[in-house]
Amino acid sequence: MSNNSESMPGGRSFLGIRTDRLAATAAIAVSAAFLLCGYELVRSVSVSLFIAACGARNLPIVMALGTLATLAFIYAYGRLLSVTGPRSAIRATSAFSALAGRLRLDRRDSDGQNPTSDG
Protein backbone atom coordinates (compact mmCIF):
# COMPACT_ATOMS: atom_id res chain seq x y z
CA MET A 1 0.00 0.00 0.00
CA SER A 2 1.40 3.38 -0.98
CA ASN A 3 1.84 6.40 1.26
CA ASN A 4 -0.81 9.13 0.97
CA SER A 5 1.81 11.71 -0.03
CA GLU A 6 3.03 9.53 -2.87
CA SER A 7 -0.45 9.01 -4.30
CA MET A 8 -1.28 12.72 -4.44
CA PRO A 9 -0.36 14.51 -7.67
CA GLY A 10 1.29 17.44 -5.85
CA GLY A 11 3.71 15.23 -3.89
CA ARG A 12 3.82 15.67 -0.12
CA SER A 13 0.80 16.30 2.06
CA PHE A 14 0.01 17.50 5.56
CA LEU A 15 -3.24 16.31 7.17
CA GLY A 16 -4.40 15.16 3.75
CA ILE A 17 -3.83 18.58 2.15
CA ARG A 18 -1.15 18.98 -0.49
CA THR A 19 1.65 21.18 0.82
CA ASP A 20 1.60 23.46 -2.25
CA ARG A 21 -2.08 24.20 -1.65
CA LEU A 22 -1.45 24.65 2.06
CA ALA A 23 1.32 27.17 1.31
CA ALA A 24 -0.94 29.07 -1.10
CA THR A 25 -3.70 29.17 1.52
CA ALA A 26 -1.28 30.45 4.16
CA ALA A 27 -0.03 33.17 1.78
CA ILE A 28 -3.60 34.31 1.12
CA ALA A 29 -4.36 34.36 4.85
CA VAL A 30 -1.27 36.46 5.62
CA SER A 31 -2.12 38.85 2.77
CA ALA A 32 -5.66 39.25 4.11
CA ALA A 33 -4.32 39.95 7.60
CA PHE A 34 -2.02 42.69 6.28
CA LEU A 35 -4.87 44.16 4.23
CA LEU A 36 -7.23 44.33 7.21
CA CYS A 37 -4.54 45.75 9.49
CA GLY A 38 -3.63 48.40 6.92
CA TYR A 39 -7.28 49.30 6.46
CA GLU A 40 -7.75 49.86 10.18
CA LEU A 41 -4.64 52.01 10.40
CA VAL A 42 -5.56 54.16 7.40
CA ARG A 43 -9.29 54.53 8.12
CA SER A 44 -8.92 56.29 11.44
CA VAL A 45 -6.37 58.72 10.04
CA SER A 46 -8.34 59.42 6.86
CA VAL A 47 -11.50 60.33 8.80
CA SER A 48 -9.54 62.78 10.94
CA LEU A 49 -7.89 64.33 7.89
CA PHE A 50 -11.24 64.64 6.10
CA ILE A 51 -12.88 66.34 9.09
CA ALA A 52 -9.96 68.76 9.36
CA ALA A 53 -10.14 69.62 5.65
CA CYS A 54 -13.88 69.57 4.93
CA GLY A 55 -15.69 69.67 8.25
CA ALA A 56 -17.71 67.11 10.14
CA ARG A 57 -21.04 68.09 8.56
CA ASN A 58 -19.94 66.63 5.19
CA LEU A 59 -18.81 63.29 6.62
CA PRO A 60 -22.18 61.44 6.39
CA ILE A 61 -22.55 62.44 2.73
CA VAL A 62 -19.05 61.25 1.87
CA MET A 63 -19.56 57.98 3.76
CA ALA A 64 -22.75 57.27 1.79
CA LEU A 65 -21.17 58.22 -1.52
CA GLY A 66 -18.11 56.12 -0.68
CA THR A 67 -20.28 53.02 -0.44
CA LEU A 68 -21.91 53.75 -3.79
CA ALA A 69 -18.55 54.46 -5.40
CA THR A 70 -17.16 51.18 -4.07
CA LEU A 71 -20.10 49.26 -5.56
CA ALA A 72 -19.62 51.05 -8.89
CA PHE A 73 -15.89 50.23 -8.95
CA ILE A 74 -16.53 46.57 -8.12
CA TYR A 75 -19.12 46.34 -10.90
CA ALA A 76 -16.80 48.06 -13.39
CA TYR A 77 -13.90 45.78 -12.45
CA GLY A 78 -16.13 42.72 -12.85
CA ARG A 79 -17.14 43.89 -16.32
CA LEU A 80 -13.49 44.56 -17.19
CA LEU A 81 -12.60 41.03 -16.04
CA SER A 82 -15.36 39.57 -18.19
CA VAL A 83 -14.35 41.51 -21.29
CA THR A 84 -10.54 41.42 -21.12
CA GLY A 85 -9.64 38.54 -18.79
CA PRO A 86 -7.73 38.64 -15.51
CA ARG A 87 -4.25 39.44 -16.82
CA SER A 88 -5.36 42.39 -18.94
CA ALA A 89 -7.67 43.63 -16.19
CA ILE A 90 -4.90 43.76 -13.59
CA ARG A 91 -2.57 45.45 -16.07
CA ALA A 92 -5.19 48.07 -16.97
CA THR A 93 -6.14 48.84 -13.37
CA SER A 94 -2.49 48.96 -12.28
CA ALA A 95 -1.68 51.38 -15.12
CA PHE A 96 -4.73 53.50 -14.25
CA SER A 97 -3.74 53.58 -10.58
CA ALA A 98 -0.15 54.55 -11.39
CA LEU A 99 -1.31 57.27 -13.78
CA ALA A 100 -3.82 58.68 -11.29
CA GLY A 101 -1.20 58.72 -8.54
CA ARG A 102 1.34 60.38 -10.80
CA LEU A 103 -1.15 63.04 -11.89
CA ARG A 104 -2.01 63.73 -8.26
CA LEU A 105 1.66 64.11 -7.35
CA ASP A 106 2.26 66.40 -10.33
CA ARG A 107 -0.71 68.55 -9.35
CA ARG A 108 0.43 68.71 -5.74
CA ASP A 109 3.95 69.71 -6.81
CA SER A 110 2.65 72.45 -9.13
CA ASP A 111 0.48 73.85 -6.31
CA GLY A 112 3.52 74.06 -4.03
CA GLN A 113 2.04 71.57 -1.57
CA ASN A 114 4.96 69.15 -1.58
CA PRO A 115 6.48 69.30 1.90
CA THR A 116 9.71 67.67 0.72
CA SER A 117 10.47 70.23 -1.98
CA ASP A 118 13.28 72.68 -1.37
CA GLY A 119 11.33 75.67 -2.75
Image (tube, grey):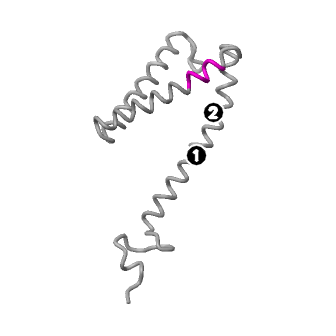
- Residue at the disc numbered 1: 34
Task: Report the residue at 55% width, 48% height from top.
Answer: 32
Look at the numbered disc 2 and give the secondary structure of its residue: helix
Q: Position of residue 55 (x, y in %)?
A: 69, 14
Question: Mark 1 near mark 2, Cβ–Cβ under 8 Å?
Answer: no
* Residue linked to disc 2: 42
Asked if residue 25 lies left or right of residue 85, the reply is right
Q: On the image, which quarter does residue 112 sit in? A: top right
Q: Earlier in the sequence, mark 1 or mark 2?
A: 1
Residue 78 appears at what percent x and percent y? Answer: 38, 35
Residue 48: mark: none
- Mark 2 is on which residue type? Val
The secondary structure making up most of the magenta span is: helix
**What crowding class fits label 2: few (fewer than 14 Cα within 10 Å), some (14-19), or many (20 or more)?**
few
User: In the rendered structure, which segment of residues is drawn in magenta?
Assistant: 60-66
Indicate yes or no whether the magenta region holds residue 108: no
Quick one: which residue is furthest to the top in this view? 111
The residue at 46%/69% (across/down) is: 17
* Residue sticking out furthest to the bottom: 1
* Quadrant (top left/top right/bottom left/bottom right) for the N terminus: bottom left
Mark 1 lies on a secondary structure that is helix
Check the picture and name the quadrant holding the C terminus.
top right
Q: Compare residues 110 and 37 and report the one nearer the observer.
A: 37
Is residue 61 a member of the stretch shown in magenta? yes
Residue drawn at (38%, 86%), measured in percent from left and top? 2
Q: Position of residue 109 (x, y in %)?
A: 51, 15
Q: Residue at x 56, y 43 (%)?
A: 35
